[in-house]
Image (cartoon, grey):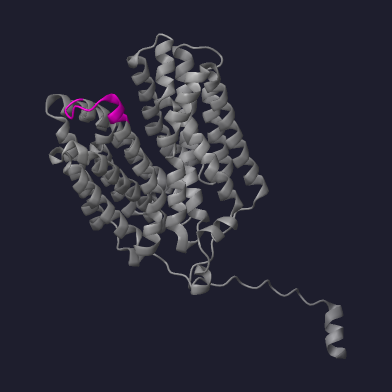
Amino acid sequence: MRALREVPRAVWLLACGTFVNMAVSVGFAFVFLYATGPRGLGAGEAGVLVGIGGAGLVAGNFTGGWYGDRFGHRRVLLVAAVGAGVLLGAVPVLPTAALYGALPLAQYASGVQRAAQSALVAVIVPEGVRRQAFAVVRAAANGGFTVGPVLGAVVATRFSYDWLYVGEGVGSAGLACWTARVVPAAREVIRRRPREERSGGVWAALRARPAVLVLLPAIVVVDVVYRQQYSTFPVFLAEHGMDARVYGTLLAVNGGMLLCLELPVAVVLRKRSPLRVIGAGLVLVGAGYGVLLVGVGLGTCVVMMALLTLGEALYKTTATAYVADQAPEHVQGRFQSLYAGASISGVVLAAPLGGGLYAVAPGTVWPVCAGLAVVAGGAVLWSGGLFRPRRPHPSPGAAAPSPPPHPRPTARHLRRARAG
């Protein structure tokens, strides 16, 4: 397929490394079991450990691009991946009290790595190819995460939880080595612009791009809504007589559909208006939760998960590429950090907000989720019609546009010329 052949070789190789890294990066999924099992912590203490680890991950996503804009995205990715690898590999030998510092720091480094990787892809891929490039990397990550928990469960039950963290540490350090080998040095891929084009910071750039200012809070809202499938939704299923096997099957529907759809959707829709594609995806997420208002049953839940997944396939890759296309070159990393942080904010916010509402008024959770996602999608669609997208500056050395041709002289013009 021609659209995929346009993706640079470095991105394909980076995606291969991402697949392997995600396949072994499952320690965070077993933190609660590890803390309450081998480490002997109570449920409350384990919950605190999981919570501060999630906060570290979100903070890393929000700040990783700022480091990259200053020190180079490739360099920051390498340092963060090695740092996370060292911390995770040391988990088995650390005292329990030290985990409250080591795991959040490791998650912070992982978040920095994630933001730096997005910015690095944005830098090495030209505009017009970014949707399919980000889709390639996301497909690899989703594929790795699909097989990772299964392998992690086998390792944890047959060997030890400790080996999960050793394997994740080795995988993170290995990703750093692989990236250093397959991705060119930052100075070879970053295209510098004249000083006058680099004036102004990230806030000035955001104010000049109001559609991005609409998009970012919309993504925060929808991520909180979307991640209810990992918190209040399994409780809802259990209360309606559907056990963990049903929940696992629904998550498999999500993973399988993403693997099959996300890359083809990005290729087919690459020339469509990005804000319309994103807005439609957010509305579909709302429609998924709206289906639960019709009735509760296996069929309804499958339709709900299918709509959520289709919405995710539409908006996540497209939004990442859109933010990259809109970013001025000197703040590319910071734009990616803002989007990366927004896109993972539900890790911290979804469970307490959704769980609190479910405890007080369980019947309102799905109408509220559906309404919030539809409103967020409508706001993005509205911004797409109201604000015209900014086009990037021409790269240095590019040929200046040709002046319009002079109109062909008429007989009247010729008579005037002779008279003068």
**In front of the other: 17 or 364:** 364
Q: Residue 341: percent from the left, percent from the top?
A: 43, 45
* Quarter occupied by the C terminus: bottom right
With 76 as the anchor, is 199 left or right in this view?
right
Q: Residue 3: percent from the left, percent from the top?
A: 43, 47
With 189 as the anchor, is 355 left or right in this view?
right
Q: Which residue: 41% across, 25% down?
A: 231
Q: Where 224 falls versus 289 (above or below)?
A: below
Span colored in magenta: 37-47
**In front of the other: 1 or 305:** 305
Q: Residue 98: percent from the left, percent from the top?
A: 21, 41
Residue 193 seen from this side: yes
Q: Which residue: 76% across, 74% down?
A: 408
With 115 as the anchor, is 35 left or right in this view?
left
- Residue 38 magenta-highlighted: yes
* Quarter occupied by the N terminus: top left
- Residue 243 magenta-highlighted: no
With 183 as the anchor, is 156 left or right in this view?
left
Q: Which residue: 39% across, 13% down?
A: 238
